[in-house]
């Protein structure tokens, strides 16, 4: 039965499609293949989610080598949710990419773009599905290397330095991660996460295990762009091709959050290290710093893409803050924000992408007057902005509401204040965009601007619609997140 | 039950109306027709809800579960029913007035105006009928956002600045303080349902009650208690119908309505009386009443003066609520209705003067009353109601609030109310009097004007006469309103 092999297909299909794309060389054919494959991965991910919701965690032994000797793919509710997010955003990006890439990347390199895109997708999906800590490193590298290439494809030459910077930081992060895994292997003799989860909690008194945790957390924090390790992110997002920015902003950092949650809650067993260590305080502090510092910096950006990039750093703080409480509700808030932030940030970057497609630039001046000229695009932008602020009836509010609950239950008053304040920062920086689009007249030297092509508008409207639909009917993602958080923590609140 | 079916429709109808308005954008007559029909249907629906509430029923509908454990719930009680009735009724009048005003004043982007107006009304209905605090909060924010395009309607740099103040204060207070208060309430009480007698009693410590009350009052920026009142004068850049219905009735009353709801159904009057958590806030409201009145006297721009008058009058209601006695609360609830009719009349008049004579400053209005007798007569009646003189509706509500203050033994607050009434006389009556005085000297409008000043279009004048007469009529029917609202004060 094919349904039994979905975990393998989830990764193998895009992985095999990548070299085929390379052989095709024709950019239209490459797009078609990439699109079909991405959509297939989305369907597979949905299938997996249904299976997991139905029957519980799936364990799949690659090549029938039983774990822990072989590599195990392990899909639980949380993993399945991340798979759906990654492949879903990937699917929505594809129609947008077809039009956008034509403009931003030289025609002869477009097929290479799709190759890298598929590899990146493979890597991200692989991270979320694998149950093997070293295999995770391999996928991390696949996704990272391909994303360096993707960023460097940006037509601005600063994209090259941004990519190089990301490469250096990313490599550091990956190295730290692999050192951490190495230390754990030294002590436990296994790389399988389920096995690790049984052994590590008993060995927490060992300095080696503590050091491993430090390496792992720092390594992933680099990939995560947690303040103050976020410096690679703003330029990488600002100068990458728009399609790449949308895709990475919505998925790459989310997958890193997934890894950090996996390590803390699955491998290290969550509660024990939180109880005695300073880990939760460190994460809470850094999360709050991310929210405040990046939020403040975002206010002063003149390039809208960079502004949104800083806002991403700020929003990553929400997720880290959520997981740092160690409570079901906090973790669930963090997990649901993976989903929420993915759709709202994708919507915002995509709206911006539609605008740049038509006017070619991304400063505030370039947005002037677009509110009237591109009503759909700018309407979607406003919806995204409202979500970012966290107003009711949008997904942003769902996260905020549960985060505040978690913080209040924890008695963390400072966190409450920071959550509320960062919402206010968001008002300021998003409203700058709205005002530019709606209150400035169209510059006289610019000819009539038209609405973006349908291929870009439809995914945009779907994303913006999702911001509202899942903001009003948040029961489905929230129930999932609560269930995932419960199974990760292993106890009811 | 018929009310259960019509309840969700009160929200759906204005939203659908808004869509239809958008679709009819190329045909102005059809578009305004849609607005009117929507307003009429909405009022009809609200009446079907009102009738069972008069009989003592409390219709309630759980619409959808939005988050696990949280429903979008609508429950009607007398306070909400009266607010919904006032807002939906005045929407009909305002729609008629808008037609006269927007066309007479040649405003642009009228489709956007009518569409967002309908959305604002939908949000108001959501606030009025909300069955729990989260539902109320959701629509509270929706109202802030849906009125933003109306405030910044003209798109000028001034409007943009005003829009910043407007959103900045309203969102700042609601996200910064009110949301926190709601969160704490939920964590403390384990429920957010509006319940008679409150939900916090026995669960929150005295200190927490004091903190929460302050967070709520200042978090509800729409109540315009100082120092968070600046958004209201800023909102006056909007077209006059917006100022009239939204910034004299729907939005500001949504604020004080929320305050009353929180006092009655979240805290419960008993809890507030025993802890004394709200009494110091009554003094804040008292200070707002006096200061805003004083500021109003210095304003020459008619709309600005009316705006500060609104700030002051809103604090009457807040003061009534903060007394936390049944008389005070009832007085506050009645003042929502009385002030609504009085103030909307005044704004309608200000708009009519702008359309007909292109005047915004009071000092330029010498002798205008002779050209526009209906408008200025209505202004006079409206002023009397705001001041609280018989035989106008405002007299009763102010009397109740003062009585409430006296019952609580707050002599200073009674004094504040008296002084404020005198100040009201001082800043409102001269406007009407000036209009009827003969225009003399250099300011003679007959000599310098290029056009003949006449009454504003019929669509403007009829509504304002109507609301003026209505505030007169309310004087005689205040008893019924009182009896209807009585249950919210705990039976009297």
Image: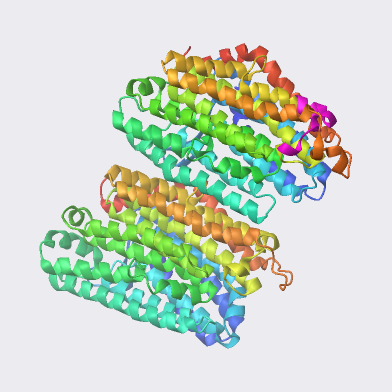
| Left or right of A331 on screen, residue A119 | right
Camera-side residue of B126 and A369? A369
Is residue B365 one of those drawn in magenta? yes
Camera-side residue of A79 and B147? B147
Q: Position of residue A164 (x, y in %)?
A: 40, 83
Residue at 34% x, 77% y: name it. Answer: A169
Q: Position of residue A438 (x, y in %)?
A: 64, 58
* Quadrant in which the N terminus of chain A appears: bottom left
Camera-side residue of B479 and B430? B430
| Left or right of A472 on screen, residue B276 | left
The region drawn magenta spans B363-377
Residue at 41% x, 72% y: name it. Answer: A233
Residue at 83% x, 42% y: name it. Answer: B29
| Left or right of A135 on screen, residue A313 | right
Residue A40 appears in view: no
* Dominant SS in magenta: helix
């Amino acid at each position: 039965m094919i349904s039994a092999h979905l975990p393998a297909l989830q990764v193998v299909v895009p992985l095999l499609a990548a070299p085929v794309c390379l052989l095709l060389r024709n950019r239209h054919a490459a797009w078609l293949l990439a699109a079909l494959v991405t959509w297939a991965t989305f369907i597979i991910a949905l299938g997996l989610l249904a299976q997991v919701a139905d029957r519980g965690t799936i364990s799949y032994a690659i090549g029938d080598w039983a774990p822990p000797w072989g590599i195990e793919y392990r899909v639980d509710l949380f993993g399945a949710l991340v798979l759906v997010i990654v492949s879903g955003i990937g699917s929505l990006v594809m129609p947008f990419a077809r039009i956008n890439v034509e403009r931003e990347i030289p025609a002869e390199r477009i097929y290479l773009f799709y190759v890298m895109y598929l590899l990146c997708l493979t890597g991200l999906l692989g991270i979320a599905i694998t149950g093997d800590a070293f295999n995770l490193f391999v996928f991390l590298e696949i996704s990272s290397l391909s994303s360096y290439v993707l960023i460097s494809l940006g037509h601005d030459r600063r994209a090259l330095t941004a990519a190089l910077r990301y490469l250096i930081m990313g490599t550091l992060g990956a190295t730290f991660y692999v050192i951490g895994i190495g230390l754990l292997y030294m002590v436990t003799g296994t790389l399988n996460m389920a096995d690790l989860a049984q052994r590590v909690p008993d060995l927490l008194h060992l300095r080696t295990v503590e050091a491993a945790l430090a390496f792992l957390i720092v390594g992933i924090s680099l990939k995560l762009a947690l303040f103050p390790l976020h410096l690679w992110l703003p330029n990488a997002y600002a100068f990458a091709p728009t399609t790449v920015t949308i895709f990475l902003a919505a998925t790459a950092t989310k997958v890193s959050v997934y890894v950090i949650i996996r390590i803390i809650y699955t491998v290290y067993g969550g509660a024990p290290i939180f109880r005695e260590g300073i880990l939760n305080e460190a994460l809470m502090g850094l999360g709050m710093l991310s929210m405040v510092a990046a939020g403040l910096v975002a206010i002063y950006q003149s390039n809208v893409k960079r502004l949104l990039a800083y806002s991403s750093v700020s929003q990553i703080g929400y997720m880290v803050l959520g997981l740092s409480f160690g409570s079901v509700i906090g973790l669930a808030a963090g997990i649901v924000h993976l989903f929420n932030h993915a759709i709202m940030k994708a919507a915002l970057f995509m709206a911006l992408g539609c605008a740049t497609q038509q006017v070619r630039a991304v400063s505030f001046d370039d947005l002037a007057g677009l509110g009237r000229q591109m009503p759909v695009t700018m309407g979607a932008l406003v919806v995204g902005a409202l979500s970012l602020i966290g107003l009711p009836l949008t997904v942003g509010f769902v996260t905020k509401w549960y985060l505040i609950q978690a913080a209040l239950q924890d008695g963390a008053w400072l966190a409450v204040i920071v959550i509320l304040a960062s919402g206010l920062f968001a008002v300021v920086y998003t409203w700058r965009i709205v005002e530019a689009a709606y209150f400035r007249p169209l510059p006289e030297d610019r000819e009539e601007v038209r609405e973006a092509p349908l291929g870009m508008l439809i995914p945009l409207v779907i994303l913006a619609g999702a911001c509202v639909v899942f903001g009003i009917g948040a029961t489905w993602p929230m129930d999932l997140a609560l269930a995932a958080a419960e199974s990760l923590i292993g106890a009811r609140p | 039950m018929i009310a259960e079916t019509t309840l969700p429709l009160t929200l759906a109808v204005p939203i659908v109306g808004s869509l239809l308005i958008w679709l009819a954008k190329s045909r102005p007559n059809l578009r305004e027709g849609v607005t009117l029909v929507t307003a009429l249907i909405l009022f009809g629906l609200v009446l079907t809800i009102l009738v069972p509430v008069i009989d003592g029923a409390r219709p309630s509908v759980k619409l959808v579960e939005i988050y696990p454990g949280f429903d979008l719930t609508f429950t009607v009680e007398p306070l909400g029913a009266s607010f919904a009735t006032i807002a939906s009724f005045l929407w009909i009048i305002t729609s008629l007035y808008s037609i006269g005003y927007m066309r007479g004043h040649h405003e642009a982007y009228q489709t956007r105006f009518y569409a967002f107006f309908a959305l604002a009304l939908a949000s108001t209905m959501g606030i009025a009928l909300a069955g729990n605090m989260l539902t109320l909060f959701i629509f509270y924010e929706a109202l802030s956002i849906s009125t933003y395009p109306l405030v910044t309607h003209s798109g000028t740099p001034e409007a943009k600045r005003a829009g910043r103040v407007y959103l900045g204060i309203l969102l700042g207070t609601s996200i910064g303080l009110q949301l926190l208060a709601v969160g704490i309430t939920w964590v403390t009480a384990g429920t957010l349902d509006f319940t008679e007698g409150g939900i916090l009693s026995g669960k929150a410590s005295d200190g927490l009650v004091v903190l929460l009350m302050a967070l709520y009052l200042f978090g509800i920026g729409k109540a315009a208690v100082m120092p968070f009142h600046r958004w209201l004068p800023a909102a006056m850049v909007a077209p006059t119908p917006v100022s009239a219905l939204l910034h004299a009735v729907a939005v500001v009353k949504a604020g004080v309505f929320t305050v009353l709801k929180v006092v009655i159904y979240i805290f419960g009057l008993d809890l507030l009386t025993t802890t004394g958590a709200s009494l110091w806030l009554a003094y804040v409201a008292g200070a707002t009443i006096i200061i805003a009145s004083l500021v109003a006297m210095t304003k020459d721009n008619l709309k600005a003066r009316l705006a500060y008058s609104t700030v002051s009058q809103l604090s009457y209601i807040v003061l009534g609520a903060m007394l936390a006695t049944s008389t005070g609360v009832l007085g506050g609830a009645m003042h929502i209705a009385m002030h609504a009719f009085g103030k909307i009349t005044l704004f309608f008049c200000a708009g009519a003067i702008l359309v007909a004579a292109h005047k915004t400053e009071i000092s330029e209005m010498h002798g205008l009353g002779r050209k526009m007798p209906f408008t200025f007569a209505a202004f006079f009646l409206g002023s009397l109601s705001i001041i609280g003189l018989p035989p106008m509706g405002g007299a009763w509500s102010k009397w109740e609030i003062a009585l409430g203050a006296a019952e609580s033994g707050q002599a200073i607050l009674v004094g504040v109310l008296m002084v404020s009434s005198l100040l009201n006389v001082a800043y409102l009556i001269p406007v009407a009097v000036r209009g009827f005085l003969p225009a003399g000297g250099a300011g003679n409008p007959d000599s310098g004007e290029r056009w003949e000043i006449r009454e504003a279009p019929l669509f403007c004048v009829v509504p304002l006469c109507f609301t003026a007469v209505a505030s007169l009529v309310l004087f005689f029917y205040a008893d019924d309103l009182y009896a209807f609202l009585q249950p919210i004060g705990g039976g009297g």
